Image (cartoon, grey):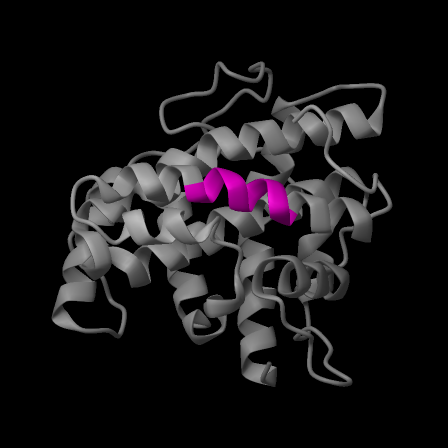
Amino acid sequence: MRTGDADRLAAFVQLAQPTAAAVVSLTGPVPDRREHADRIVRHWRTELAPLSALPAFAGRFGAPIRDVLAATVQSLLVLSLARLCEVTDVHSQVRLLAHAVLDEELPAGWRPPAGAEADAATGVIVPGTTGTESPGTESPGGAAGLVAQQGGTEVGIDGTAEERAQWVRLMRRVPTGIVRLAREMWGVRRLIDGRAEGRLWHRAVANVPAVGVVGATLGERHAATEIAARVYVALSLADNLPGI
């Protein structure tokens, strides 16, 4: 991983703090940290599957956007668990995200950009929510967004004409906050090949137009469990994920 990639992930971590904090709040309070962690994983498996699978309607043409969107929501799962375990410094969160989602290591001696450490330590509920909803009763779009739907058509990212068209479709169907984070993740998309994607048949079906959403949904649910297992070990929560 390059220094610029790590800096981009640090920016992602800063932007993601409100959503990660909101998920911890919405799934608690729970006296037992392990039980709370299990709730967070179940929540993101529910949110991640349909959200990450949306670009699969376009088959293989939607694959680049699907990968970035999935990596974005997977990263939110990681950051939610990190916040639950009081791991709030940017360096530790970026290192955990790189390991669990991208299967990458930070550059030797890398430190977050100035000011990033202080920002990530503050988690606030996303504007527009009360912070009192119980799991399963989130606002439209789920706690993955907790923000208004994006209605714009200007993408403002690099990519092919087809990729930009896919971004426009995504912006019309996914909460604004998630699109903003996905655009940040788009800057490190060359690293996303190492992310968990489910089994081989999940990936094969995901590349078929229309029906691809089925394979993508199942694949992302499987991937969420795999990523959570890595984080549980890294944060000393448990060695496995029974009952999730």
Q: Residue at x 43, y 75 (%)?
A: 190
Residue 225 in sight:
yes
Placement of the N terminus among the 4 image quadrants: bottom right
> In the rendered image of this protein, does residue 210 appear above or below residue 193?
above
Q: Residue at x 60, y 40 (%)?
A: 225
Name the magenta segment's main secondary structure. helix
Q: Residue at x 55, y 40 (%)?
A: 19
> Along the horizontal axis of the image, is 167 left or right of 128?
left
> In the rendered image of this protein, does residue 25 appear above or below residue 177?
above
> In the rendered image of this protein, does residue 211 appear above or below residue 184?
above
Q: How many marks?
A: 0
Residue 12 x %, y %: 54, 60
Residue 152 in sight:
no
Q: Residue at x 64, y 59 (%)?
A: 97
Q: Is residue 100 magenta?
A: no
Residues drawn in magenta: 219-227
Residue 196 x %, y %: 53, 55
